[in-house]
Amino acid sequence: MRKVKIALVAIVGIVALPHMTLESFDPCGPLEPLYPMAPVAMAQDVPCAVPISSAEGPGFSPQQQDYRSRLHALATGRGVKVAIIDTGVFGHEQFSRLEPGEDLVTPDNAESLNDCDIHGTVVASVIGARDMGIAPDATLLSIRQSSQHYRNSPDSESSGSLATMTEAVHSAIDNGADVISLSVVACISEERAATLDSHGLSEALGRAEDEEVVVLASAGNIDGECEPGMVVYPAVEDTVITVAALSSAYELAEYSLPVAQGQWVSAPGTVDIAVHPNGTGWMRGAIKNGTEGGFNGTSYATPTVSGTVALLLERNPHLTPAEIREIIYASAQSAHHVHDPLAALGYLPESMPKEIRTVALSPETAEESPAPARLKMLIATTGAVVLLVLFITGVINNSRRQRSHVLAAKLPEVSGQSAKQPRERQRPKHRRARHRATRGAGQFLR
C-alpha cells in the first residue's frame, strides 16, 4: 500500500514538522476515492507542543502603526466569517468572535478549540487577533482537521487526510463561512497524482465556488516530503488562491515551494508573536520534540491574505470568488507577486461592471423669471432720467444764452457813458476857482 503525505506547512526553527500520512489505493489500479469514509484518529500518543511565553505583545513601528490605521479605516472584517481548517484554535481574550466548528481529529470528544500543535492558533492570530490581526473584527470558525499528536493508525505519523480535508471544506460551507483558510497541504509526485482520484476534494472546492466561498491554501514548504515539481493539494486547484512565503520584503523564502502552475501570491512567512494557548498573554515560539524555534512557513503567509479577503468582503459583500482572485492577483507587486493588503483594498478589477448613471435633461418648467421684466423697467426708468437731465440741462443752457445776449446789447451804452465822465470832471469851473483861491491862500499864509 502506498502513502500520500499531508503536511502542516510550518517550520519550527530549522526542523520541519513531522508529516501526516494517509493510505491510498494502488496507483496501478482503477481510480477510486482515497477513503470511502474519513479515518478517525486514535488516542493521543505524542506530547503537545510547549509554548514559549513572551512578556511583550505585538510591537509595531510608527510606519506600521500608520499602515494599520489606514487599513482598518477602510475595513476590519466585521460581518465576515473565516473558517480556519487546521489543528484547532485555542480560545483567547484576543479572539472576541471565535466559534467552535467540527472536530475531525477526535469527533467523539470534540475539541476544536484545543490546539495541541500550536499551529492553528498562530494562523488565527494573524487573521483575527484584536491587537495584531489583519481582520480583527472577523468571525473565526475553528475546524480541527489534522494533528501531529494523534494518529490514524499505529503505523501512521499523524492524523489528517484528503478525506478529512474534503469533509472540513463541506463543514465550513455548511456553517456559513465566507472564507476558508487552509494551511495544510498534500504533496504528491506527478506520476502518482495522475492516478490519484481526488474528485471528492475537487467537488468540495467546486461547491465552495458555487456558493461564493473564497478558498486559500499554502504553497507548501520544501522538505523531505515536499519537493519542487510535486503536485500540491489543494493549491493545485484553479479556484484556490495559492500563497507562498517571503523571507524579506521582496524575497521568497528558500523553504517556500515554487508554484509549478497557475497564479499565486506571496506574503511574510515569519510570525514573531502570537496569542498564548493559556487564554491570556503572548508567545514567541514553541518547543516541538525538544526543539525550540519560532513560527516560520507558508502556513503563516496564508492567513495574511485570508485576512485581506475578509476585508474585501466587508467592503463589498457582493464580490464573487473569481473577482476576489482577480483583485488579489492583479494587486500583487514585483516578480514574486508580493501581496499588499492596502493595495488590494484600493484595487478595482477590470471585470467588475462600472456603475453608469443616466442623467435626463428636460426643459425648464418653472414659472418665468421676473428678471427680464425688471431689466426692462430699469432700462426705461434710466432712459427717462437721462431725458429729464438732458431737458433740464438744455433749459439751463438756453437761459444762460439769452442773458448773454441782453448783457451784450447793454454793454456799448455803459461803455460810452463811462468814457465821457472823466472828461467832464477834468474841467469843472468850480475847481478852477478853488485852485486859484488855494494859491492865493498860500501866498497869504507866507
Image (cartoon, rainbow, N blue to C red):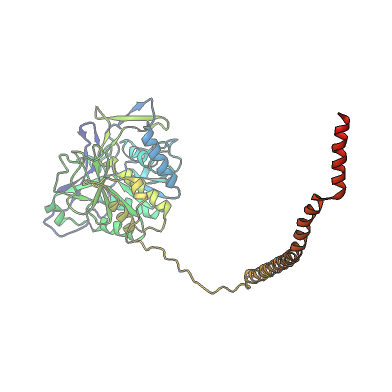
- Residue 415 appearing in the image: yes
Which quadrant of the figure contains the C terminus?
Answer: top right
- Residue 8 appearing in the image: no
Tell whether 119 sits left or right of 253.
right
**Residue 341 at what x, y percent from top left?**
34, 46
Tell whether 64 sits left or right of 251.
right
**Residue 168 at what x, y percent from top left?**
32, 50
Quarter of image, res 151: top left
Tell whether 19 sits left or right of 343.
left
Residue 398 drawn above or below residue 107: below
Q: Nearer the viewer, residue 229 or 89?
A: 229
Quarter of image, res 202: bottom left
**Residue 44 at what x, y percent from top left?**
29, 36
Q: Nearer the viewer, residue 412 or 369?
A: 412
- Count of all numbered marks drawn on residues in the image: 0
Identify the residue at horizontal 26%, vertical 29% (top origin).
Answer: 293
Residue 59 drawn above or below residue 107: above
Q: Nearer the viewer, residue 388 or 423?
A: 423
Tell whether 289 sits left or right of 432.
left
Q: Nearer the viewer, residue 274 or 89?
A: 274
